[in-house]
Image (cartoon, helix red, strand yellow):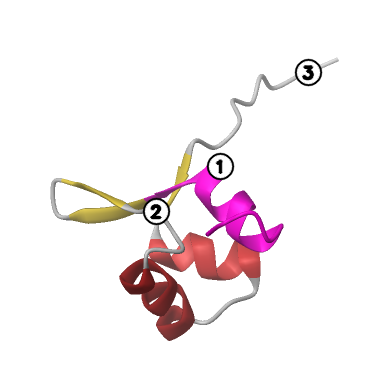
Amino acid sequence: MNTVNQTPKLGFSIKEACHASSLGRSTIYNHIQAGRLRAIRVGGRTIIPADALLALISGEAA
């Protein structure tokens, strides 16, 4: 049997965050701007940590 060892995703690009959360791109950026969604810049990319996206969706984000 072929098993693939998959590591849980640690961060999402904006596009991936939109897909995973069913939120639009503008909504994601609005939450980042308002401080309700933590995002970090790595090089030229904006990465949303998985725990931050989960906190927003579950209503835990301030």
Q: Residue at x 52, y 59 (%)?
A: 62
Q: Which residue is mark 3?
A: 2
**Mark 3 packing: few (<14 Cα in 10 Å), some, or many (20+)?**
few
Q: CA distance from mark 1 to mark 3?
A: 30 Å
> Where residue 62 is drawn, which disc sits there?
none
Task: Please name the residue shown 55% across and 54% down the image.
Answer: 53
Q: Left or right of 26: which side holds 19?
A: right
Instruction: Please identify the quarter of the rendering in which residue 9 is found.
Output: top right
Judge the density around disc 2: few (<14), some (14-19), many (≥20) Cα neighbours within 10 Å. some
Camera-side residue of 1 and 21: 21
Residue 8: percent from left, percent from top: 61, 31
Of labels 1 and 3, earlier in sequence is 3
User: Residue at the location (34% across, 54% down)?
Assistant: 39
Q: Can you name the residue that lies furthest to the front here?
A: 62
Q: Nearer the viewer, mark 1 or mark 3?
A: 1
Viewer-nearest of labels 2 and 3?
2
| Residue corresponding to mark 1 | 51
Give the vertical position of 32 relative to 12 (above or below): below
Q: Nearer the viewer, residue 32 or 10?
A: 32
| Secondary structure found at label 3 | loop
Image side of residue 22 versus residue 26, left or right: right
Q: Is residue 52 above or below residue 21?
A: above
Vertical position of residue 10 compared to residue 23: above or below: above
Instruction: Give the residue type at disc 2.
Output: Arg
How far separated are the C-alphas under marks 1 and 2?
9 Å
Name the image quarter holding the N terminus.
Answer: top right
